[in-house]
Amino acid sequence: MIAPTTAALATGFGSGHPSEPVVAHILSHPGVLRTPSPKLTLFQKRGFADPALCAQLVALIDESRRPSTVSDYNGDAAFRTSETCDLDAALPVVADIERLIIDFTGLDPVHGEPIQGQRYAVGQEFKGHTDYFEPQGIDFHKYCSIAGNRTWTVMIYLNEPDAGGATRFKAIDKTIQPETGKLLCWNNLRPDGSPNPSTIHQGMKVRAGVKYVITKWFRERPWGFGEAP
């Protein structure tokens, strides 16, 4: 088991808003890269998860994957074509990656959704989307009535597909290539706490091989029982 650091236990930044304490905590870790853009708060860290841990998570995703869903397809049945699974937090490997994420962000774990795994085969993608739920969206009440909207996203690449599968942040025209164990982390909100449309991003089509990632989202309020796409 990987134990959380004293700093992570002591901070517990709740929902992550305001964002300044979270940003300072993330930047306190060595090797963190911040994207220089006034439009959004986006970090990368290579080698965040070791290859052995990533391989164990890949195996769990393959055991339990199902077709992915979204809250609103906008009339496009091919909007998200990947497969998804919910990872059981009681499993030691899942508990280990949870601790690493909480240690890295300093966010209060009670605000976190269960970790999801995603698998992208050749031709599969997730078209341009934001992780927060549109306040005027058709399913906003269904997904946000208990825990509120999503605040921070943490995504980790578990492998490197043979070709394709990059993550593109469209508003800043930045494309990030998958690398085993690389972490991406961003704030879905503006400084005033409103949803930030500049966080729109795309899981680009895999052209060869298979891509695996895990994602953990944090909420405005403590996570309650319920489903999320």
Image: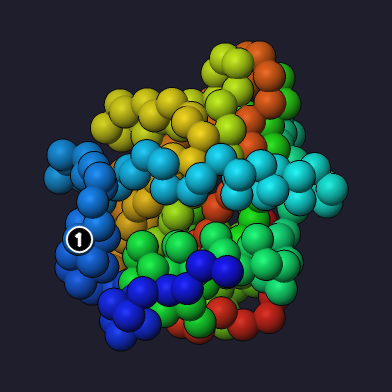
Residue 84 to residue 192: above or below: above
Q: Position of residue 145 (x, y in %)?
A: 57, 79
116 lies left or right of 152? right
Residue 12 to residue 107: above or below: below
Q: Quadrant of the C terminus?
A: bottom right
Residue located at (51% from left, 45% from top)? 50
Residue located at (45% from left, 54% from top)? 154
Q: Position of residue 203 (x, y in %)?
A: 53, 32
Q: How is the image coloured?
A: rainbow
Query: Where is mark 1, residue-wise?
Result: 28
Residue 75 to residue 69: above or below: above
Residue 188 in view here: yes
Q: Position of residue 201 (x, y in %)?
A: 44, 38
Q: How many marks?
A: 1
Residue located at (76% from left, 50% from top)? 60
Residue 120: quarter of image: top right
Task: Identify the secondary structure beneath mark 1.
Answer: loop
Q: Amino acid at mark 1?
A: Ser
104 lies left or right of 227? left
Front position in the image: 128 or 186: 186
Residue 7: quarter of image: bottom left
Q: Position of residue 75 (x, y in %)?
A: 68, 37
112 lies left or right of 40? right
Residue located at (65% from left, 61% from top)? 93
Q: Quadrant of the N terminus?
A: bottom right
Residue 130 in view here: no
Q: Badge 1: how crowded within 10 Å, few (<14), some, or many (20+)? A: few
